[in-house]
Structure formats: C-alpha cells, structure tokens
C-alpha cells in the first residue's frame, strides 16, 4: 500500500516529510490562483494547498466532492492566522507533488459533510453507503468496533471460550415470533432463525465448556421501535459453577472495562441494585433511569377513606415531587399519564403557606404530612397517580420520564448510570390466554426456597434468580441462573401449561441432555446495539448499525424484503396466498 498514514494522523511531527494519503474529497474551495482541497478518510480530514504554479493545479481544478484521490506531497506548517485547533490536522497542510483521481463520483443526493440541512432517515438508509461516510456515523461504528475489541480482550483474559452456535435451528417458544426458513430437502418442514442462542449455550455448559461467549446474531419477528431491529446483535455469555453474585461481579468488571477502554469513563463499582418490586414501586419502571431523582412517595394511607373518592378506595396512591411547572407542561404530563393507562393526573402546587390548584381542596389537614414526606419546595408541584398498583406506578413512571425530557433533568448529573434490577417474578398471569406464562424464559431458575410454590395457588409469588442490567433507563442486558435439575424443569413446564408430551416434542433433545450431568450455571446477554447506542449518545440503534432496517422493517437500499420467483417457491414447497 502506498499510503504512509491516515489523513487524520497528520500533525506537526510530520512537518518536512513527504506523505502519501488516500481518501475522498470532502470539499474544494476555489480562490484566485489557489485551491484548498479538504481530503477525508475515516480518521479525519486534512487540507491540501495547491497554488497555480503547482504541477497538480489543473487536476485540483477537476476535483468535486466525493471523488476518490491519492496525493503525495510535503507536509508544511500553516502560516500564522491560518492555523486552527478545530480539527486535529488544523496546524499543517500538504503541498502536493502528485495528485491522482482514482474514481469520480456523481453528485450525492445529500451532503456527506458540513450541511445543517436535515436529511430524512429514509433517504439516508436508501444511500446508506454514502451516509456511512459521514463523520458522525464513522465515529459510531469505530466506537462499536472498539467496544467489540474491549469485550474480546476482557473475556479472553477471564478464560472464556468463543463458540459460534447455529443460525438455522428449531422453532422454540421464546416470547416473540420466529423468522421461518423453509427446507428444500425436507418439504413442508422449516428451520427457524434463532431469537437467542439460549438452549445451545446451556448445552455448552453441559458439554463442559464452562465459560462461553459470542457476539451472536439474533432474529425476532416483532414490531419495531427506536431500540429494536428484526436482526440484531447480542453479547451472549454463560458460566458454570457460579452463583448469581459471581455473574453480577464479572459483568460489572466487564462493563467498567468497556467504558474505560472505549470512552475513558470510569464507572463507579459496584452498581446499585434494586428489586423488581422496588424499582416499580419507586420509579414506575423495571428499567429506571437513575441519572436523576424524583422517586415516588406512597401516600395511600393519607387519603384512604377520605372525601376525595378517586383516592379514598384506590389500591395505591403515589406522589412525585416535581419542580415548578407551567399549566401547559401540566397538560402535557396529564396527556402522558392518560396514554399510559391512568384516568388522569392529579396535582397541587406548593405555596409558602400551603397548597393551591388542582386537588388542593382535598388536601386539608394532610398538608403537613405531605410536606414532610415529599420535601417539595415552594413553587414545586406534587403529581399524583392512584388506582391498581401496577397501573398507577407505570403511569407515574411515564410522567417521570416525560419530566426528565421536558426539564432536561439529566443535563447536570452523571452522563452514565448503570444499575441492576433483581428478583423478577418467575411467572406472570396472561389475561388474554387465561394462563400462567414465564416472564423471561422457561429455563430461568427460581429461588430455591420458592420451588415448593409450583403448582399451588401461590405460584405467582415465585421469584426468579433473574437480573437485568440497566443503563440510563435502557435495559442493556438480561440474564439468570438456569434450571439444572430435570425435576424443577418439569415443574416449570407444568406451571405454564406445557404437558409432558408437549415438552418432549419441543425440547426433547434438551431434556435428554439435562439428565447427563448438568452443572449449576447461569449467564446473561447484552443488547449490544442498544449498549453502543447509549455510549454513542445516539437517538436510535439504527445510528450504530451499519446496514439497519427502517422503522417498518424494510431495507431501503437492498429493497428487502422482496418477492421471489415462482421457481424458488416451488423448490421449497411454499405457495404465497395474496392478502385480501
């Protein structure tokens, strides 16, 4: 390779040296008898200065944005008044002795660099190969690459074995729809793309590979959101002969190493821990953003049996002490509460001598106790949610997050906050199906003291040895200790209404394996795209994935999904029925 260094590596130490650079033309500034050419590669930009007496002057005049060039020239210190620290190469320039156009470019459909004009996401995704040239996108993907390298270094040093698990496997129930792949060699039968490597990584523990990891590609046919994609990457890990504490401690050290190596940020250890019940009770979410406060206070007892009917017989009444709010902001917060299942949002405003506005006439002699419990400052507002416990706290949790965004409550706090949420319910009641189902997956181990609750009217109280890793209000990891006792596994299947025959039909190979000496084991999977999104400060995981789908699940560049011809369908025995 002729290139002597990346463009962005140039600095004053290169002054007097002849270098060869290769990259793209970012822009050309045309002055009388002089061109300033800005050249770019993934490392940064540098300036070529071409005077009229330079042998490359004519070629420089042909250059347009996004032409690919190779330049050889002398690095010179810029003159006084021309130097800049706005970018890393701003104190030097290159005087070309040779300038070659390697490839010409059509006019891009949007500026690759420097424009403040917003570009629609669909247009960016249609021309993703151009979008990826933008410095912001290149920073995101380089950060992602650095995170992969940091993870690999750490886990290799900790004795983990990297193993790849199958991409074509059997359809198993894991909570979302599978992507199905018809088999040509077995007409009428289908593979499924993996939603996760869950069973395979447990089989690796049974096989004796006591520390496993991979950056696994996973697939879920579900509705898309800003932090979801149909195909995504998770950092998958599993360990044998561990307790929950062992798993959490190693994950904390790994997360700290990634932030240190990639961002130069030191995360305080250990991470705070909340129970699932406590997280919902205080913050209205099982993935609370703890970069700011505004924890809820329970005031159910203050209003029970009182004159305010909405609170008098409510299952729970929670209050959040907010800063000063306008009537318009209160209206927006009420809209958020209603969108999240609340009948409304009650409020009172703190004045020097008591409360006014909203439901203040129902506060009465409770004012002193409200002040003591909430500590609301004069001018501040108390926001109330009442009703069935989970609905009330969930609605107030949405209001809490809306307050964060309305008032910029995270601007002055820590940039990153990581915490654990523990002790999830093992089972939850599915109202639609009228049956119990698993909260995480059916291989999650219960707390040993709760095993006896299976099959009783108290099985909803079973606590899972499950844990979620939460970063800035996003769940970036989730895992559990696994069931390694075949009898407990049978109890779990029975609890979710899976007969012995059905369990055998769906999971027979795994149930057989459990009977051949299974060590206690547990693990976790990080949502790697989501983690990088938060680390990069991006608004969507699409900003940190090279070639993502849009919010409708479409690849606008490759035009996927797409029809296939009848011959291909016939080969796999599939007939397409047109939608009515």
Image (cartoon, rainbow, N blue to C red):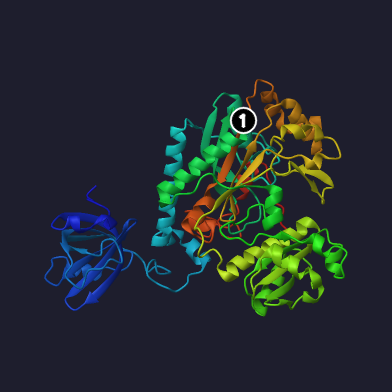
Give the residue at x 55% y 27%: 210
Find numbered disc 1 in the image and state the secondary structure of the residue it sits on.
strand
Q: Is residue 111 left or right of residue 125?
A: left
Q: Position of residue 187 (x, y in %)?
A: 68, 37
Q: Position of residue 171 (x, y in %)?
A: 68, 39
Q: Position of residue 562 (x, y in %)?
A: 59, 55
Towards the viewer: 170 or 350? 350
Q: Is residue 252 left or right of residue 261?
A: right
Towards the viewer: 151 or 290? 290
Give the residue at x 51% y 45%: 269
Q: Answer yes or no: is residue 547 visible.
A: no
Q: Taking 75 as reference, is 200 above or below it?
A: above
Give the residue at x 51% y 69%: 120
Q: Answer yes or no: is residue 43 visible.
A: yes
Towards the viewer: 516 or 342? 342
Disc 1: which residue:
521
Q: Is residue 310 left or right of residue 286?
A: right
Q: Position of residue 46 (x, y in %)?
A: 26, 62
Q: What number of labels is visible?
A: 1
Q: Taking 548 as reference, is 190 above or below it?
A: above
The answer to which quarter of the image holds residue 454 is top right
Towards the viewer: 323 or 291? 323
Q: Which part of the image, by quadrant, shows the C terminus? A: bottom right
């Amino acid at each position: 390779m002729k290139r002597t260094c990346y463009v962005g590596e140039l600095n004053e130490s290169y002054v007097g040296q002849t270098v060869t650079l290769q990259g793209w033309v970012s822009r050309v500034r045309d002055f009388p008898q002089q061109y300033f050419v800005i050249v770019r590669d993934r490392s940064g930009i540098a300036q070529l200065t071409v005077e009229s007496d330079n042998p490359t002057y004519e070629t420089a005049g042909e250059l347009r944005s996004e032409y690919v060039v190779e330049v050889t020239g002398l690095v010179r210190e810029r003159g006084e008044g021309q130097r800049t620290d706005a970018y890393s190469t701003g104190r030097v320039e290159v005087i070309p002795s040779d300038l070659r156009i390697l490839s010409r470019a059509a006019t891009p459909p949007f500026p690759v660099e420097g424009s403040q004009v917003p570009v629609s996401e669909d247009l960016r995704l249609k021309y993703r190969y151009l979008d990826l040239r933008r410095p912001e996108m290149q920073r995101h993907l380089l950060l992602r690459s650095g995170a992969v390298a940091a993870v690999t270094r750490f886990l290799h040093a900790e004795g983990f074995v990297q193993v790849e698990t199958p991409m074509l496997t059997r359809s198993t129930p894991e909570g979302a729809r599978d992507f199905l792949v018809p088999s040509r060699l077995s007409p009428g039968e289908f593979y499924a793309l993996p939603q996760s490597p869950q069973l395979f990584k447990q089989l690796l523990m049974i096989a004796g590979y006591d520390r496993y990891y991979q950056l696994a590609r996973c697939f879920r046919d579900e509705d898309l959101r800003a932090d979801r994609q149909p195909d995504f990457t998770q950092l998958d890990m599993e360990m044998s002969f561990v307790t929950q504490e062992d798993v959490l401690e190693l994950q904390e050290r790994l997360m700290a190493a990634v932030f240190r190596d990639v961002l130069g940020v030191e995360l305080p250890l250990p991470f705070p821990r909340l129970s699932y019940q406590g997280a919902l009770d205080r913050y209205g979410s099982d993935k609370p953003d703890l970069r700011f406060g505004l924890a809820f206070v329970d005031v159910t007892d203050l209003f029970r049996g009182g004159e305010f009917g909405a609170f008098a017989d409510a299952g729970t009444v929670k209050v959040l002490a907010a800063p000063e709010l306008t009537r318009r902001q209160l209206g927006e917060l009420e809209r958020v509460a209603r969108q999240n299942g609340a009948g409304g949002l009650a409020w009172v405003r703190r004045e020097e001598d008591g409360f006014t506005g909203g439901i203040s006439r129902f506060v009465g002699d409770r004012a002193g106790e409200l002040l003591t419990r909430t500590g609301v400052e004069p001018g501040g507002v108390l926001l109330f949610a009442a009703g069935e416990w989970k609905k009330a706290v969930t609605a107030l949790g949405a209001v809490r997050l809306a307050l964060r965004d309305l008032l910029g409550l995270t601007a002055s706090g820590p940039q990153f906050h990581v915490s654990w949420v523990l002790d999830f319910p093992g089972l939850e009641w599915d109202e639609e199906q009228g049956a119990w189902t698993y909260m995480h997956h059916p291989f999650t181990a219960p707390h040993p003291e709760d095993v006896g609750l299976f099959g009783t009217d108290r099985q909803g109280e079973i606590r899972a040895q499950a844990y979620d890793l939460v970063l800035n209000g996003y769940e970036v990891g989730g895992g559990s200790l696994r069931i390694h006792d075949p009898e407990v596994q049978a109890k779990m299947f029975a609890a979710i209404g899976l007969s012995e025959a059905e369990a055998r039909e769906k999971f027979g190979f795994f149930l057989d394996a459990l009977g051949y000496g299974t060590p206690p084991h547990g693990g976790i999977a990080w949502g790697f795209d989501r983690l990088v999104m938060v680390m990069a400060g991006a608004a969507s995981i699409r900003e940190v994935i090279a070639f993502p789908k849009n919010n409708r699940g479409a690849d606008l560049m490759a035009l996927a999904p797409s029809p296939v011809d009848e011959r291909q369908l016939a080969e796999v025995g599939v007939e397409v029925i047109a939608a009515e």
